[in-house]
Amino acid sequence: MATRTSIEWTDVTWSPIIGCTRVSRGCDGCYAITSARIRSFNPNEKIAAAYAGTTSNTDRIDWTGKVNLLEDRLLQPLSGKGLWRKPCRVFVNSQSDLFHEAVPEEFIARIFAVMACTPQHTYQVLTKRHGRMRALLNSQEFVAAVHTETYVLNRDAALGSKQQWPLPNVWMGVSVEDQRTANTRVPALLRTPAARRFISAEPLLGPVDLTRIPFRGDTEYVVDALAGRYGLREPRELFCFGMADLGVIDWVIAGGESGPKSRPMHPAWARSLRDQCGKSRRGVPFLFKQWGEYRPYWAPETDGRPCPEPVLYVNAETGEALVEAEVPDTGSWQGVHRLGKKKAGNELDGRTWLQVPALTTTNGESR
């Protein structure tokens, strides 16, 4: 099923795969688990069947690890009907992870073939399975399988894109929630061929420095993934431009967590990512999606608005959240108030940040 979405960084969600498994603490508040559970009881038998068996409710509602491959949804972009009549940005598999271990390589190749046959759309693939993403997209056998499947679907598209890899209309991204996941997933993304590479730091649960990513596991040598350079961690003056076979990050999305058990985000984390993008020599686009359930405490003497008391204080270094009475005198703590996602909004320092990269055409040029 393809649906119009309110997600700020895309237009349409396309989910030919349903089902997943948690892999890190960024998955703890996953909205897709709850929605999948609800839809598995939908009175429409076709919808219920698409979600059947993907969730369970024992200690908590969770994924079972079962993944449903939906043939009827796979070819939807080729129809040219409904949402597919005009070019759009498409978030691929909002209800799963394209590179989940239970998804056969053949099915992933078919999804890429559909994307190859619809170059008018820009597809955004987001994953936490960075290792499989990197391995497949660098595999000559996988690329050959994509071209074969493309030929089956559309001979003209296959011949026209035979030499095009990566596909010019497919953006690849990884989710990161803190520095640990960034250090693991970002290097894999930099080694993955893609028309655009992006980071989704949502939910942002800790500080992330994209300019100091360990280079091939060496903590003394680091990568500035935004500027496209590497070198010694310190001093910065010894950085060398150019990253050999590594790519760069073209876009950063950041946001806080929403939902009933949300964890608050320290505003310094979002500001840091914004500033890293702005100060990069490449001027990397930055999109601040939302505060989530919690918005920072504001001082009434600065803007005149009524000032609710903060319900929690968040530590900038650790992400620990405490009530005021438990906050120690040391450390960087920020008060936050629970307003709900809608009221908290997405203004950061008095304005919205909704920057996006230029779209890419079938010949790889920007438009």
Image (spheres, helix red, strand yellow):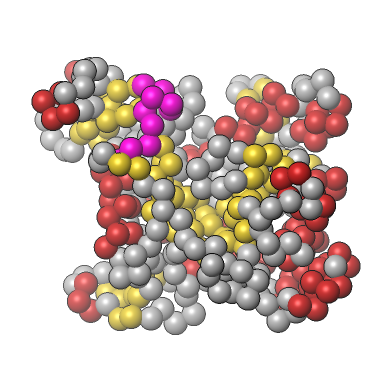
Picture residue at 33% right of the left edge, 80% below the top: 241
Question: Relative to residue 273, is residue 324 depicted above or below?
Answer: above
Q: Is residue 220 visible?
A: no
The front one of 142 and 358 is: 358
> Quick one: quadrant of the N terminus?
top right
Residue 133: quadrant of the picture:
bottom right
- Image coordinates for residue 186, horizontal then vertical, percent: 46, 61
Is residue 221 or residue 3 the one in the foreground?
3
Which residue appears at 38% of the width and 24% of the height? 343
Q: How many marks?
A: 0
* 149 horizontally vs 279: left or right: right
Is the residue 79 above or below the residue 30 in the image?
below
**Where's residue 350, x and y in %?**
26, 39
Residue appearing at x 36%, y 28% in the figure: 344
Q: Quadrant of residue 280?
A: bottom left
Provide residue 190's location: percent of width, then percent of height.
Answer: 49, 68
Please identify the quadrant where the C terminus is shown.
bottom right
Query: Does the magenta-highlighted stretch encompass residue 131?
Result: no
Q: Where is residue 204 drawn, in percent x and y?
A: 40, 42
Picture quarter containing residue 346?
Answer: top left
- Of residue 103 and residue 49, the one placed in the foreground of this image is 49
Residue extent of the magenta highlight? 339-348
